Structure formats: structure tokens, C-alpha cells
Image (cartoon, rainbow, N blue to C red):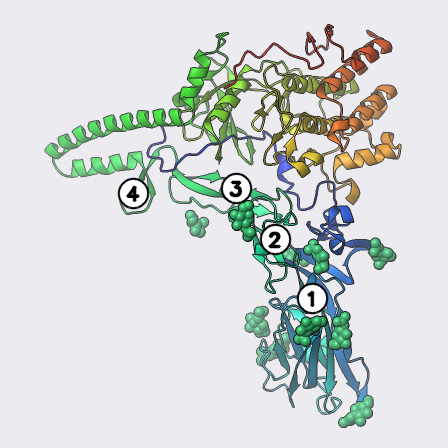
Amino acid sequence: MGFFGILMQVTWWVGVIILSELAAAAISSPIALPNCLDRCGNVKIPYPFGLSEGCSIDPNFVVNCSQSFGQFQPILGNLRVTNISLQGQFETMMDIAKDCYEQGVHSLSTRLSLLITTVNFTVSSAQNKFVVVGCDTDAYLYGSQQNESYRTGCASVCESTRYMVNGSCSGVGCCEFDIPIGFRNFTITSRSFDNHTKVQSFNPCGYAFISKKGTFNFSVDFLRSLQDKEKMPMVLDWVIGTGTCEDVHNKSSYVCGGDSTCIDSNTKSGYRCKCKDGYDGNPYLPHGCQDINECEGPKLCNLTGQGCINRIGSYGCFCIEGYHSDRTAGVDLCVTNQSSLQVNLLIGLGTSFGALFLITITLVLFNVIKKRSETKLKKKFFKKNGGLLLQQQLSSNENNVQNIKLFNSKELEKATDHFSENRIIGKGGQGTVFKGMLSDGRITAIKKCNTVQEGNIEQFINEIFILSQIIHRNVVKLIGCCLETAVPLLVYEFIPNGTLFQYLREENEEFPLTWDMRLRISIEIAGAIFYLHSAASSPIYHRDIKSTNILLDEKYRAKVADFGTSKSIAINQTHVTTLVHGTFGYLDPEYFQTSQFTEKSDVYSFGVVLVELLTGEKPVSSTRSEAGRSLSIYFLHTMEENHLFDILDDRVKKEGDKEEVIKVANLAKRCLHLNGRKRPTMREVAIELQGIQKTFDGQQNYEELQFSRSEEIEHSNVSFTSTGSFFEIASTSSSTVLPLLPFKKI
Ligand SMILES: *[C@@H]1O[C@H](CO)[C@@H](O)[C@H](O)[C@H]1NC(C)=O
Ligand SMILES: *[C@@H]1O[C@H](CO)[C@@H](O)[C@H](O)[C@H]1NC(C)=O
Ligand SMILES: *[C@@H]1O[C@H](CO)[C@@H](O)[C@H](O)[C@H]1NC(C)=O
Ligand SMILES: *[C@@H]1O[C@H](CO)[C@@H](O)[C@H](O)[C@H]1NC(C)=O
Ligand SMILES: *[C@@H]1O[C@H](CO)[C@@H](O)[C@H](O)[C@H]1NC(C)=O
Ligand SMILES: *[C@@H]1O[C@H](CO)[C@@H](O)[C@H](O)[C@H]1NC(C)=O
Ligand SMILES: *[C@@H]1O[C@H](CO)[C@@H](O)[C@H](O)[C@H]1NC(C)=O
Ligand SMILES: *[C@@H]1O[C@H](CO)[C@@H](O)[C@H](O)[C@H]1NC(C)=O
Ligand SMILES: *[C@@H]1O[C@H](CO)[C@@H](O)[C@H](O)[C@H]1NC(C)=O
Ligand SMILES: *[C@@H]1O[C@H](CO)[C@@H](O)[C@H](O)[C@H]1NC(C)=O
């Protein structure tokens, strides 16, 4: 049964499924600039704030994170920060002004002042109130804003607690009022009329303070107990710049990132940024606003038979298999195909034979029509999903290699047992992977994406086409696809032994993760990426290299998976400018800043994988110290201090050849160079790793290796054929050309 009556306008997608995304899923999108710390103690520090000048928008937003009394204290200007929100506020603790009396003798200071030294911050008018508590109290708030000054106050007088109402601050025992906007400088004073002599028994002090709305709820107890309280939370507003959105929108100083909007501050001097509806994240980062996968949150398409599909910036509901839409009541409802038949049948039995006969005919007709519209729908999807284009492309393929099979939806339904829950082998942010058995007995991994993305048909088809042409022993093979369903399905070869990420963490007696094994795996990965980069008519960048994307086959050979985000590019381009994709911890900082993905961005991610192989550590871990949360930084830092051997995996330390380990570590360091141009190419990486293994095998001496590595020679043949060989290069120029990909550019 196909998808009958799907209502939605199905848009285009280029999806990625992360087979085992457990590690990545735990890390939400970054809030700070890459390679910047994002917390101080337990306070999160989102950009535009930062712990150093390079990490914050300007010096006024630098948080000084210093340790005192064994705790990290974030200090901003002259204020200690307790919480920063991206809605333009942060919190601090403000003293309470008190005047206390004991037997009529004055005991405490009654005046306190605060001048917020940073001009970009003001006391929030919307979120604070000025509160006075006492029964013999008269308190004032003075403020000044440049040359304008402001003064307000209230008095609270009472003889007993009798008329006081818990929760009400309206003049008996407690009074409060709002404060004006835009203040940075104020003084609070509190006085008494009779030195509290008459109310001493239940109210020894008068209190005055500014506090965050909703945090102070008056109760009779406070007349006494506030004496022991030092501070109350106060909220400050922060804004960017001094102009309105209109003033800055076209200027280079405008800081709001992609998919965000600008909001004027309430003083009209300065503005804030906010992610658009359907997006979430830090709007101050260039690509901080990320699409919300509404389908993962509280159940939205929750009516019987409905399924949810995420779109960029929104979501939609559709009828799942076995249901079709019914718009009779003016609402989109999904009803079972069967139930409508059953109802018809019941009516039929309940009336007469004649009616039954009629109904039988109706049913037959209904089924015929249904079949027809199902077929029509499949055709429609097929066309929409670019099937015709792909067919055309396959038939115009000169080499006539039919590498990709077009499956029909029935076949894949059967293979996955109707996409049964217990066939699921992986679930990522963008979709689900099912294990399936084809009719010829082949085991496959079938990807069903739930992300629908605006895009274009040609690009998507080109992508499928290119992927189908990749034949490399260390690349997971795309076997075919199905374009007859609402979202296309991709069929891959099944790789049985999990991911490198898991392998690094599990004991495996049959195939222990020895140093040689690690070296071999790194060579295999490097070879596969190099192969993709040097693809003949257009290089293919992987864009999401990470240990969870490296699968292991029955012999624990590496297979690079997940080219969903790869985009082949024309040969005359050296970089592609796109939305930043990738996984935190592996993301090239240069790419993050410029949005330009180059081949060196893949090199960076590979460098992180190399470090994982060396250290066995996770790419991002909160168990390491603050500064070492990101493995790449931690590693570079350790290398700098010459402590490499402290962080190596125990096995590597024990079994690895010291010289080899150092060579690999140095190579990783070069791959992680902050400047992409200084990183080696994937070709150099592959050759160098191969060389390290060879020296070990004693099959090639060092000079030869040096030669082949540094050559940029024309018309020479370099070929590696050894047990671990992964590619044969017929190098005719400095840019290696692999005549292996017989595809045409569209
Ligand atoms: C940060 O605060 C500490 C302690 O308050 C102080 O010693 C240090 O000078 C401050 N650093 C900066 C850069 O302001
Ligand atoms: C900071 O404020 C947010 C909401 O404004 C709240 O959810 C969070 O718990 C607060 N964090 C701390 C450490 O107080
Ligand atoms: C209140 O106390 C102050 C000094 O502590 C004293 O000068 C003043 O006379 C007292 N006023 C009353 C009404 O007791
Ligand atoms: C702060 O306000 C007080 C009066 O409330 C005033 O004397 C002082 O000059 C102000 N300081 C600044 C820097 O505006
Ligand atoms: C404050 O001072 C500025 C110049 O220093 C002047 O233009 C402005 O009118 C003054 N505002 C008030 C309310 O006096
Ligand atoms: C007000 O609250 C205090 C405790 O916070 C309680 O002891 C007292 O009985 C309450 N009074 C009324 C009238 O509810
Ligand atoms: C404040 O306290 C009163 C009684 O103690 C309670 O009824 C009320 O809900 C509280 N208000 C808030 C905002 O907590
Ligand atoms: C903070 O205020 C100063 C002075 O008005 C201004 O120069 C600076 O650009 C502001 N900082 C930000 C991030 O808007
Ligand atoms: C911004 O620039 C565009 C064209 O570059 C112009 O159409 C628009 O009116 C400008 N907006 C503002 C607020 O100046
Ligand atoms: C069902 O979905 C609707 C929106 O589609 C939502 O408003 C409603 O809260 C959901 N109900 C439940 C129980 O989740």
C-alpha cells in the first residue's frame, strides 16, 4: 500500500542520517564562537559575551572568569553575573539597603549606590521592581541618567501585622513600584520615622531593594527574616550598538546571524537579535539559528494516522501508510483505508442483498480507483523526486554501467517488514535507518529521511548519481534508491560491525584495537577521503567526517559512510559557500567563520579522527577540564607542552612504536592547523600515513618516502601497491586525476 492521499506539498531534501549519533546528539548547537569556552563555573556564557576579547563581540562584553573561594566567578564590568540570557538580559545579585535598630539604637548603613560602569548595560525596567519592606520605613530610589535625575520613594507604616496580606505588597508592611527605563546609576536610601521603637517586636529593620519580578513574594515573616538576607537577584538589559534596527540593518556592524531578525531595544538605543520562528540557537553567531525539528518535540501531528515531517523553519503533518486524508469536515483527518471499507460492509449486511450487491460493486470500483490513484501517486512522487531525470542520466551514461538500482516501494516495504520498529538500526536527527533484506537475500541499510529541505531536483539527483559511481573498498556503497514515496529512500550496503566511535570504546577480543590496527584504519579512511577529493570531473567533499561516520565491516576494515551532506563541486571552484553543516567537535573553525568549505575542512575533521585514534578520547567531553573540552584544543595544547605521552591511549602507549606514534601525532597536529592553507592535502596525508606504515614494514626506506612525499612533479608515476595499498595513482600532474568516475556533469 502506498501513501494514499498525502496532503502535503513535498519539498526537496538532501538528508543525512547519522547512523549512530548518540555522542553528537548529546551536544546541542554551540552558543560560543568556535574554540571559545562557553561557561564559567556553572554560568553559561553565550556569544556576544566571551571569556576573552577574541571570544566576545567587544571588550565591554568580556567576562572575567576568575577563581575565588574555590569557585569560578564570572565578572562583567563591576558586576558578578549569575545568569546570561540571549533574550538580552543577564542577572546579578544586588545588596539590600537596611536600617536596623536595637532598643532604638541605629545599627546598619541605610544607603547604597551602584554605578554600572559598562555603557551597554542598563537596569531592566520590565523585569525589576523597587520594593520597600517595613512598618516604620520611608525609602527612596535616586537615579541619574547623564544630566537628568530621577527620584521616587514610598513609605510603609503599620502598628501590627494584623492587616497584612501574604503575597500583597500594597502599602501595609510592604510597598513597591516600577522603575524607569535606561538607568545605570542609582542610590537607595532607607529611613525610619521612630527608630522602629513601636514595632521593634516584629520589625527591627526597614529594607529597600531592587529585585527581579517574581522572585520576592511578600509574607509577614519577611518583616524580621530579611535581616539575615544579604542580596536579591536583579536583572540588567544588554543591547548591541546604540542605534535602532533601521539604522544598522544595512551596515557592516550589524551582528545578527542568518535566519534571525532584529529587535529594537525599549530605549530605542541599541538592538537585539532573535532567531526566526521555527529556528532556535544563538542568533548572534553567523549560523547560530538552527532549524528546530518540531517532530522530535511534543507530539504535534497527534491525530490517529498522522505522521510528522520536519521542514526547514516549520513542519507538516501527513497521513501514514494505511491511512488516507479525509477532508469532509473541513479539517484534515486521516482515516484508515480499511475502516471505511468495514463501515461500508456493515451497512451492506444490515440492509439487503441488493444493497450488498451494489456495495460489492462499489468496493470493486473503489479498489480499482484506489489502485489507480496509488499508481498515479507513485508516478507523481517518482517524477517529483527526480526519477525521470535520474533515468535519463542512467541511460545516457556512456559506460553503460548501471550502478544504481531504482527500487519500487513495495520491494523496500517487504525488505524492511513495513518499516517495522524492530528493524531500526539507527536514528539520527534527520531520519531513520532500517535493516532490510532484499528479495535476492542481500542485507542492506535503508535510509528514510524525515527532513524535507528546499533544494533543487538536479542537485539531489546529481548527488545520487555521483554517489552511485563511487566504488571504493573503504566507502559505503549506495546500491539504489526509491523515488516513489513521499520522501525518497536510499539503499546502502549493510556494514555489520558498528562505528569506529563504538570500536574505540568497546573491548574486542577477536579484533583488538592494536596500534597497527589504528594505523591501518587511519590509512583506509585517509585513502577513501583522498579518493573522493581527487574524483576526476569534480571533487567530492565529505563535510561530516567523524568517528560515528566510519563503519567497520566484518574484518574491521573502515568504510566511510554518510555522504548526505557532500556536494560535488565544479572543478574550477576551490570552495563552496553554504550554510554551515557538520558536527561540533569536528568542525573546521575556519569554515565556521567564513562559511567556505574547502578540501582542508575535511582535512581538519580527519585530524580530529586521527587524534581519537591516538588518544581514545571523545571529540567533545565534559569530563576534561574546561579548556580541554574540545579534543582538538586539548590535543594541540598537550602537544605544545610536550606532554603527548600523557594523553595517549594506554594500548598505544604500550604497544605503539614511539617514533611512529610521534609521526602520526605530528601529522594530526598539522591537520588541525587553524589556517587551512597550512594544513596538508588529503593526498599528502594519505601518502604520509602510508609511509609511516611502510617504514615499519621495512619495505621502503625513508629517503624514498621523502621523495615521493615532496614531489609535485609532472609526468611521473607514483604507485603504491603493497598489502595495505588503497589506491593506484597514475599521476600526470600535480593535481592527481583518477580516471575512475565515469560520470557526466549535468
Ligand atoms: C579578573 O578578576 C580578578 C579578580 O577579581 C582580577 O585580579 C583580574 O585582574 C581581573 N582580570 C581582568 C582582565 O580584568
Ligand atoms: C538562567 O535563566 C534561565 C531562564 O531565564 C533558567 O532556565 C536557568 O535555569 C537559569 N540558570 C541559572 C544557573 O540560574
Ligand atoms: C533615632 O536614633 C538616632 C541615632 O541613633 C537619634 O539621634 C534619634 O534621636 C532617634 N530618634 C528617635 C525618634 O528616637
Ligand atoms: C550618579 O548619580 C548621582 C546622584 O544620584 C550623581 O551625583 C553622580 O554624579 C552620578 N554619577 C554618574 C557617573 O552619572
Ligand atoms: C543634557 O545635556 C545635554 C548636553 O550636555 C543637553 O543637550 C541636554 O539638553 C541636557 N538635557 C537636559 C534634560 O538637561
Ligand atoms: C503568611 O505566611 C506566613 C509564613 O510565610 C504564615 O506563618 C502566616 O500564617 C501567613 N498568614 C496568612 C494570613 O496567611
Ligand atoms: C505569593 O504568596 C501567596 C501566599 O503566600 C500565594 O497565594 C501566591 O500565589 C504567591 N505568589 C507568587 C507569584 O508566588
Ligand atoms: C557598547 O557601547 C559602546 C559605547 O556606546 C559602543 O562603542 C560599543 O559598540 C557597544 N558595544 C556593543 C557590542 O554594542
Ligand atoms: C538596505 O539596502 C537595500 C538595498 O541594498 C535597500 O533596498 C533598503 O531600503 C535598505 N534598508 C535600509 C533600512 O536602509
Ligand atoms: C496535538 O497537536 C496539536 C497541534 O497539532 C497541539 O496543539 C496539541 O497540544 C497536541 N496535543 C497533545 C496532547 O499533544
Sequence-first disc among 3 and 2:
2
Q: Secondary structure at mark 3?
A: loop
Say whether disc 4 or disc 2 marks the residue closer to the N-terminus: 2
Q: CA distance from mark 1 to mark 3?
A: 34 Å
Secondary structure found at label 4 = loop
The reply to whether callout 1 and callout 3 are in contact (CB within 8 Å) is: no
Residue under the image location 46 percent in, 42 percent down: 315
Q: Quadrant of residue 587?
A: top right
Q: Which mark is residue 327?
A: 4
Q: Nearer the viewer, residue 113 or 733?
A: 733
10 Å neighbourhood of mark 3: few (<14), some, or many (≥20)?
Answer: many
Q: How far apart, in angstroms, are the residues tagged by discs 3 and 4?
A: 27 Å
> Is residue 139 rendered to the left or right of residue 360?
right
Question: For the residues carrying marks 4 and 2, which lies nearer the camera in this image?
Answer: 2
- In this picture, is 383 found above or below 706? below
Dot 2 or dot 1: first in sequence order is 1
Q: Which residue is mark 2?
A: 248
Rendering coords of residue 641 (x, y %): 88, 35
Viewer-nearest residue: 2 or 287: 287
- N-term mark: 3 or 4: 3
Disc 4: CA contacts within 10 A as few (<14), some (14-19) or many (>=20): few
Task: Please determine whether, in this image, residue 321 is positioned above or below residue 297.
Answer: above
Residue at 72 percent of width and 14 percent of height: 734
Q: Which mark is residue 634?
A: none
Q: Amino acid at mark 3?
A: Asn
| Displayed quadrant of residue 710 | top right
Residue tagged 3: 293
Q: Label 1: which residue? A: 233
